[in-house]
Image (cartoon, helix red, strand yellow):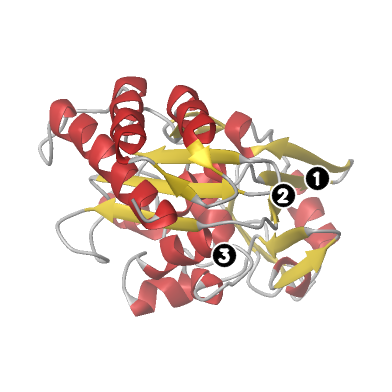
């Protein structure tokens, strides 16, 4: 361990990081700092210590493992851009923040924020991703759909560190779109991801800022899958319109000074139809 102070630990391995966190239960885990530092500056959070993951090499990088993409939690978001094995995640990463933020922000930080408007989260829930959590006692995996309990709250227990995100490598169209004041620098007013799995003949939709947590729209997904001509790779326009209606009915969006709940509900339907049109050439 390069530095081991009662208020700050800078470990070099995941095992050291888990031990450092166990010794400092109130410390905050930090990697890029783009999630935590704005809250500290604004006075919303006052951590009593930090465990930095910046020098833990095993938490960085992307690799393939038995048909799964394993993304280290401390991997900068910029490294996901152009990721051919997960185009929806790549598109979400490309529209996150500014170039400076994308170089600092990490995949694990975006996941641990548990905020419904964060870019990567609709793609992760549509991809049926898994979150890997590591502590001194070992490692466990949690389906991303079960990971976020409420805005800012996850199922991570004290002493656990998000160590990786696991994404299945699928054959089929994927994309992510969002509505915001700008394409990058502002958080999404509404966002959506579409994942088509041709092998399973399934269509999956994930939405951001459409409920307290990222959500799916099972009825819309089932309707789309039933009406896709899987041999021709087409979907009838009326089926796309019905999927948009079903998706809008499935969400429970927030209302704030940026947009009304009604606007976000409408936007959910618009984004759903837009993605289906791209996927199936409607």
Residue 281 found in image quarter = bottom left
The front one of 159 and 140 is 140
- Calculate the distance from the C-alpha at mark 1 to the C-alpha at mark 2: 9 Å
Q: Position of residue 266 (x, y in %)?
A: 19, 33
Q: Secondary structure at mark 3?
A: loop
Residue drawn where x is 57% and y is 72% of the image: 83
The spot of residue 236 in percent (x, y) is: 37, 40
Q: Who comes first in sequence, dot 3 or dot 1? A: 3
Q: Residue 31 — which label?
A: 3
User: Which one is in front, 91 or 218?
Assistant: 218
Cα distance in 3D space between marks 2 and 3:
14 Å
- Residue 268 placement, left or right of 153: left
- For residue 224, say whether it is visible: yes
- Mark 1 neighbour class, 10 Å CA radius: few under 14, some 14 to 19, many 20 or more: many
Relative placement, left or right, of 62 versus 218 is right
Taking 64 as reference, is 127 left or right? left
- Secondary structure under tag 2 reads helix
Secondary structure found at label 1: strand
The circle on residue 161 is: none
Q: Is residue 56 left or right of residue 274?
A: right
Residue behind mark 2: 21
Q: Nearer the viewer, mark 2 or mark 3?
A: 3
The residue singled out by tag 1 in the image is 135
| Residue at 23 percent of width and 45 percent of height | 189
274 vs 13, nearest the viewer = 274
* Mark before the other along the chain sequence, 2 or 3: 2
Question: Real-space Cα distance between discs 3 and 1?
Answer: 17 Å
């Amino acid at each position: 361990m390069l530095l081991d102070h009662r208020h700050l630990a800078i470990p070099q391995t995941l095992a050291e990081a888990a031990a450092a966190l166990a010794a400092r239960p109130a410390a905050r885990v930090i990697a890029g700092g783009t999630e935590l530092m704005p809250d500290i500056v604004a006075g919303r959070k006052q951590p009593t210590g930090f465990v930095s993951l910046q020098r833990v090499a095993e938490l960085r990088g992307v690799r393939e493992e038995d048909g799964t993409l394993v993304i280290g939690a401390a991997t900068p978001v910029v490294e996901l851009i152009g990721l051919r094995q997960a185009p929806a995640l790549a598109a979400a990463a490309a529209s996150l923040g500014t170039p400076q933020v994308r170089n600092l922000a990490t995949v694990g930080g975006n996941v641990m924020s548990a905020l419904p408007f964060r870019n990567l989260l609709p793609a992760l829930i549509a991809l049926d991703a898994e979150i890997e959590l590591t502590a001194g006692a070992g490692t466990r995996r949690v389906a991303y759909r079960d990971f976020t309990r409420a805005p800012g709250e996850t199922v991570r227990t004290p002493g656990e560190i998000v160590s990786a995100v696991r994404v299945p490598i699928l054959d089929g169209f994927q994309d992510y779109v969002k509505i915001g004041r700008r394409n990058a620098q502002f958080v999404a007013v509404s966002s959506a991801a579409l994942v088509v799995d041709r092998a399973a003949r399934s269509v999956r939709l994930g939405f951001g800022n459409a409920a307290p947590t990222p959500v799916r729209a099972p009825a819309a997904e089932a309707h789309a899958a039933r009406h896709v001509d899987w041999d021709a790779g087409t979907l009838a326009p009326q089926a796309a319109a019905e999927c948009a209606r079903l998706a809008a009915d499935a969400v429970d969006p927030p209302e704030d000074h940026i947009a009304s709940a009604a606007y976000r509900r409408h936007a959910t339907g618009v984004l759903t139809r837009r993605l289906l049109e791209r996927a199936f050439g409607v």
